[in-house]
């Protein structure tokens, strides 16, 4: 059993409320009548285990869960090969650098690239 509770009846969306893509995804979901449980990464601090679980569910390493093109990343960090623990701390202290939105439904997980990706669930 994972750190993040999931259900085949509940869609959970992990997102950054300042992200245009996340806002568009939420708007699209509401327009389609899709009810989602919202987890704003800027308001809800994820544990290291939760971040690791999200990465695994998406088939990514924790390092690949970091958006190294995000302005906040480029402002504060240089491109390096950090340890997993370092990447986790970076995400926990700077949640805006985590790739998102991430949609979960049961054992399915999708990293949203466009709002219509919500239909992949």
Image: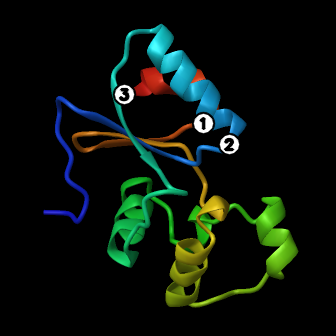
Residue 33 — which label?
A: none
Residue at image point 85% right, 70% down: 74
Give the farthest residue toward the front.
43
Q: Earlier in the sequence, mark 1 or mark 3?
A: 1
Secondary structure of residue under mark 3: loop
**Quadrant for the C terminus in the image:** top left
Q: Which residue is mark 2?
A: 19
Mark 2 crowdedness (10 Å alpha carbons): few <14, some 14-19, many ≥20: few
Q: Is residue 80 above or below residue 106?
A: below
Mark 1 crowdedness (10 Å alpha carbons): few <14, some 14-19, many ≥20: many
Q: Earlier in the sequence, mark 3 or mark 2?
A: 2
Residue 22 — which label?
A: 1
Residue 98: percent from the left, percent from the top? 60, 61
Give the farthest residue toward the left.
1
Q: Which residue is mark 3?
A: 121
Q: Nearer the viewer, residue 89 or 108?
A: 89
Q: Nearer the viewer, residue 104 or 59?
A: 104
Cα separation, mark 1 vs mark 2, equals 5 Å
Q: Are marks 1 and 2 in contact (CB under 8 Å)?
A: yes
Q: Nearer the viewer, residue 17 or 91?
A: 17
């Amino acid at each position: 059993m994972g750190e993040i509770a999931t259900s085949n009846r509940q869609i959970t969306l992990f997102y950054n409320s300042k992200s245009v893509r996340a806002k568009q995804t939420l708007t699209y979901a509401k327009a389609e009548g899709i009810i989602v449980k919202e987890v704003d990464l800027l308001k809800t601090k994820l544990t290291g285990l939760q971040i690791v679980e999200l990465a695994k569910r998406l088939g990514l390493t924790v390092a690949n869960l970091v958006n190294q093109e995000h302005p906040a990343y480029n402002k504060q960090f240089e491109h390096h090969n950090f340890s997993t623990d370092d990447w986790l701390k970076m995400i926990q202290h700077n949640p805006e650098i985590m790739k998102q939105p991430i949609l979960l439904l049961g054992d399915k997980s999708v990293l949203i690239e466009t709002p219509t990706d919500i239909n992949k669930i």
